[in-house]
Every structure is written in C-alpha cells, then in structure tokens.
Amino acid sequence: MKASLLVIFCPAKKTQAQFLADQFSIPIVDGSHLAFAKPREIEGFVCSLTRANHSEPSFVFLLSKQGLSLAQVAVDNLLSIRANFCSATVNYRRQRGGGKGQMIAKAVGLSSSTAPNVFDATAGLGGDAFVLASLGCPVTMTERVPEVHALLTDGLCLAHEWGSENDQSLVAILKRMALVGSDAAKYMQTIEDAKKPEVVYLDPMFPQRTKGARVKKEMQVFHQLIGKDSDANLLLQIALECAQKRVVVKRPRIAPYLAGLEPNYKLEGKSNRYDVYLCH
Ligand SMILES: C[S@@+](CC[C@H](N)C(=O)[O-])C[C@H]1O[C@@H](n2cnc3c(N)ncnc32)[C@H](O)[C@@H]1O
C-alpha cells in the first residue's frame, strides 16, 4: 500500500510538494484554507477527500508548516506519522535521558572514551540513529521504503533549520547523521573494506502482535505500510560480513533470534532485547 495523494496546507512549501508529487506520481490537493484549522477539521477534510475521489487511498502525505507526515486514512479518522527531532520529548531524552547508560549505547559498545561509527541498516524514522548520534556516534542510515525515506529526509531538514536558529548542539548531532535511500543489503555489499563500519545496527520489522499488548500508533501505521521485513535473516548474514566489530539486532524481548543465530550476548529490557554478535 502506498501514498496516493498529497495535501498541502502551507503555500510556502509548493516547490517541495511538487517535488514529492512528481517522485510518487500522485496528485496535489490544496488544503491551505485549513492551515490554522483544528486537527479534527483537517481529519474530516482528508477523509472526505479520499471518499470523494472514490479511489480510497489508504495513505496520504500531509505537508504543513510543521513538516511532512504520512496519514493512514481509516473510515473517519487519521493515524499519522512523521520524523521529528525537535519535539519536547526528543529534547528531553537528549538532554536528560540515560546517556551512555542506555541499553542501546551499551549494545553498540559506546564507552566514555569511544563512540564507534554505526551503520543503521533499517533507519525507519531515525529514532535509534538519532539517539546514537546524540551520544557521539557517526551514523550512516539506509531506508528502502520511499515514503519512509521522504519522511526522514524532511524530519532531518526541518531539525537542521530549527537547530540553526535555536540550538547549535542539535546541528552538531545532525552533522553526524547521513541518510541513503537504498536497500541495506545491496548498499553494504558496495562498501570497500577500508570504509566498513565498526557496528551494523539492525531493527527490522517484526510481525504485529495480535493479542493483548497495545501497539503504538506509529507501529500500526508502519505495519500497514511495510508489513514484515521478510528478508531480515539474509540482512543479518550480510551485516556479519560487513561489520568490523559487532552487529546489534533489536528484537521484541520474546522474539526468536534472527536467522535462528544465537548472539554472543544479549541485553534485555522490559519490551525489547538487543542481540549482540561480535565479529572477529
Ligand atoms: C522497525 S523500523 C526501524 C525503526 C528505527 N530503528 C527507528 O528508530 O525509527 C524498520 C525499518 O527498516 C526498513 N528496512 C527493513 N529492511 C531494510 C533494508 N534491507 N534496507 C533498507 N531499509 C530496510 C523498513 O522499511 C522500516 O522502515
């Protein structure tokens, strides 16, 4: 399922809207009369649009002053996702979070004296990459789903603009992050030996839990858009050949090992687990 429409709420972003419309071969709808409307009104407008078109698009790009988001259209409501590196929550975690004591930091081998360079093969909306870059790691990311890549590109650009005016430490973090729109398996096979990353980080999609647990809004949209990364086992094999020091795989705590391969050790949290494979 892919995006089939772009609604623009901010006339100043016309050039970006046209670029995206061309890239995804989708029409643009003008929503600028709703630039200052309440979220409920915007929801109503987008839902009515998709019905009026009889095309029943499941995903719609929304481009507003706040940036690019992707909305999954349900019967009368929207679930939307965006990459955001300057929200209050992100700022709080960056400034007051667990620092190098966080599980993800320990998993990639961050210490007081070393910040390894990391290849994040499964970037998604860049949350994990941002945490690692905040802790000093240079991070190269790949994302292969064009919609997700577009959201991440926009999130990084807006954060750069906001940081340049308000927070130079954010700009320094963003300078450590590079994004490539590519399949990670293909990309890793093109990296020359001297440039191989110390750490490869993998967080592939895992089948959605059906019972019990409430799934986060973001993950619901991701599951509808992407489904399961069924080639993740192969990705691990290629990652093990590419990493100089270690491969880290993020999994739900109770999930089986990727490719059935037992890690050298694992770090377990409440809902997630980091499997660490050391390379020799
Ligand atoms: C669970 S999400 C990653 C979330 C990410 N760690 C974060 O913090 O936002 C998995 C993402 O990896 C991407 N992905 C999976 N396999 C990939 C591959 N071989 N190459 C590039 N991207 C891939 C998927 O499209 C999806 O966006």
Image (cartoon, helix red, strand yellow):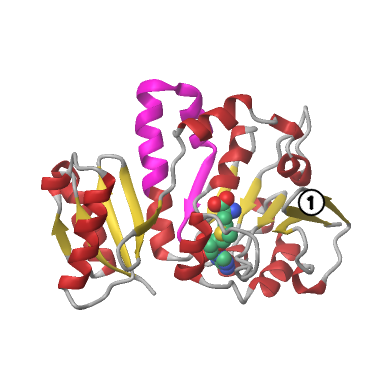
The answer to whether residue 231 is above or below residue 83 is: below
Magenta region, residue range: 154-181
Coordinates of residue 135 in the picture (x, y in percent)? 65, 33
Residue drawn at 83 percent across, 57 percent down:
279
Where does label 1 land, which residue? 245
Q: How many numbered discs, if any? A: 1
Residue drawn at 26 percent across, 59 percent down:
20
Q: Quarter of the image containing the C terminus?
A: bottom right
| Quadrant of the displayed image that contains ligand 1 | bottom right
Secondary structure of the residue carrying tag 1 is: loop
Coordinates of residue 173 in the picture (x, y in percent)? 53, 32
Of 146 and 175, which appears nearest the observer? 146
Q: What is the chief secondary structure element of the magenta stretch?
A: helix
| Magenta stretch: includes residue 170 | yes
Q: Quadrant of residue 56?
A: bottom left
Of 135 and 199, which appears nearest the observer? 135
Residue drawn at 71 percent across, 44 percent down:
104
The reply to whether residue 122 is visible in this rendering is no
Q: Quarter of the image containing the N terminus?
A: bottom left
The reply to whether residue 238 is visible in this rendering is yes
Left or right position of 1 against 198: left
| Magenta stretch: includes residue 114 | no
Coordinates of residue 15 in the picture (x, y in percent)? 18, 50
Q: Would you say the beta carbon of the disc 1 residue lies within 8 angstroms of ligand 1?
A: no
The answer to whether residue 127 is above or below residue 235 is: above
